[in-house]
Image (spheres, rainbow, N blue to C red):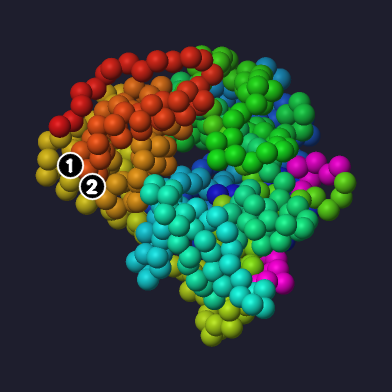
Amino acid sequence: VHGGERYLAQGDIKLVKEALRERGLLAKNAAHLVKDQSFVIPNYSWWGGPFYFIGLTIYDFLAGKLSIGKTKYLNKKNVLQKLPAIKSSNLASGILYHDGQFDDSRLAINLVQSTVENGGTMINYMGVTGLSKDNNGQLNGVIVKDEFTGKTYHVKGKVIVNATGVFTDDILNMNNTKHKKMVVPSQGIHLVLDKSFFPGEEALMIPKTSDGRVLFAVPWHNKVVVGTTDTLIKDTSFEPRALEKEIEFVLETARNYLVKAPTRKDVLSVFAGLRPLAAPEKEGQSTKEVSRSHKIMISDSGLVTVIGGKWTTYREMAEEIVDEASKVADLPEVSCKTHHFSIHGNIPASHADQSDHLYIYGSDIPEIKKLQQSDAALKQKIHPKYDATYAEVLWAIECEMAETLEDVLARRIRFLFTDARAAIDIAEDVAQFMAQRLGKSEEWAVLETKNFIELAKGYLLEDYSPKKETQIIN
């Protein structure tokens, strides 16, 4: 959750101010998930210290009252105290600055819960296969397909919003096959390593690597996440894969700065994500030069489409989209209430014990602990190395719309992203537990296990077979 110090360097002051404001609001609206993360930039030249100190002091100033911490200049000794894992040779000084950190899929789940609590209807695993129009060519609904039963439905609506990220053009094609390409996917990858490679609470930020990219090493869920890349991708996918050149770039760059050099076998998980960048207006423009700000378009048929943007500014994007959609549907004008809207799970940051892995559940923590106390089986750990329990699996399927093994082990409990080998080891046991609780067959559990293990192998750089370390819960 960041203002985008890189966008400041590019001179995009408007985007930085917008993102810093939204970062501050999110830190209050979802305090259980968003935390202050201090970053240190090590300088290996005499000019680096003054240059970055001035730039990041401006960054703080732009945040105004919503600033989450003040930039500080560090001497070499202080840098090594903060970042004991980095190489000290030729180190001159450092700059410490503050940004926000969160868990992306947990916030998405909390937003779904908040929507339901406020009268919205959320539907999972219902894919849009077509758009419907009236006699005047105006959109009046969508054709959707239940991905489990195969049954299709025609859902009518006064206005339709296309907020589908890298798949935006697929929906635009349903509306008009002759439309101009609007989104260019840019891939970023992360490697997850054991905390021993980067102990401590501070994060590392290298503002300019060998090819001009930014490198981060950030503590996350008691691991360290190293990345990222910015690679133009031609084809969109629900499961983007890290390219070999990206993996080598991140490993090689990390080795240049870390005392303990990571190798391929040290990678606990590698994952890729696609950024839905607005297509560049100039021919040959690189993804790094394309603005991260969002754009809203309204087609002749009334389809409201949003492209670009980033997680940090999601709330402002939503506000603008709803305002535009309301005009298209001729709905009464209503003032936005989300600036200071407490998202599901929100508790004051001072009450969130982030040493307890349950902190991501916020105000739901007492309910999960009740489940653990109600049944000895639910108190049992999913994996002997980690604290997550079967109560969290039950919570995911009963209260968080989890339908598949991947839902649980990737986007409710983050095993796939923090330790893919551990996720593979427990896949069968968790699938059996889910089958029992959801009333599914043995065949369902076997197929879910097979599909998940196949998926999880793509998150590792070496071949791996599951080890039987846990017992199936009856």
Q: Which residue is mark 1?
A: 372
Query: Are the residues at dot 2 and dot 1 in contact (C-beta closer than 8 Å)?
Result: yes
The one of 124 and 462 positioned closer to us in this rendering:
124
**Quadrant of the image occupied by residue 191:** top right
Q: What kind of residue is marked 1?
A: Gln
Say whether residue 286 is left or right of residue 93: right
The mark total stands at: 2
Q: Residue at x 54, y 64 (%)?
A: 142
* Residue 299 covered by magenta stretch: yes
Q: Position of residue 27 (x, y in %)?
A: 48, 56
Q: Residue at x 49, y 58 (%)?
A: 144
Disc number placed over residue 49 in the picture, else none: none
Which amino acid, mark 2?
A: Ile
For the record, the magenta segment spans 284-302
Q: Residues within 10 Å of mark 2 (few under 14, many from 20)?
A: many
Residue neighbourhood size for the residue with mark 1, other residues' Cα within 10 Å, grouped as few (<14), some (14–19), many (≥20): some
Find disc 2 in the rendering and name its residue.
Answer: 368
Q: Is residue 257 above or below residue 329?
A: above
Q: Furthest-right residue in view?
A: 283
The local secondary structure at tag 1 comes to helix
Q: Where in the figure is residue 445, as x and y percent of width and height?
A: 29, 32
> For this view, does 117 lie left or right of residue 241?
left
Mostly what secondary structure, the magenta segment? loop
CA–CA distance between discs 2 and 1? Answer: 6 Å
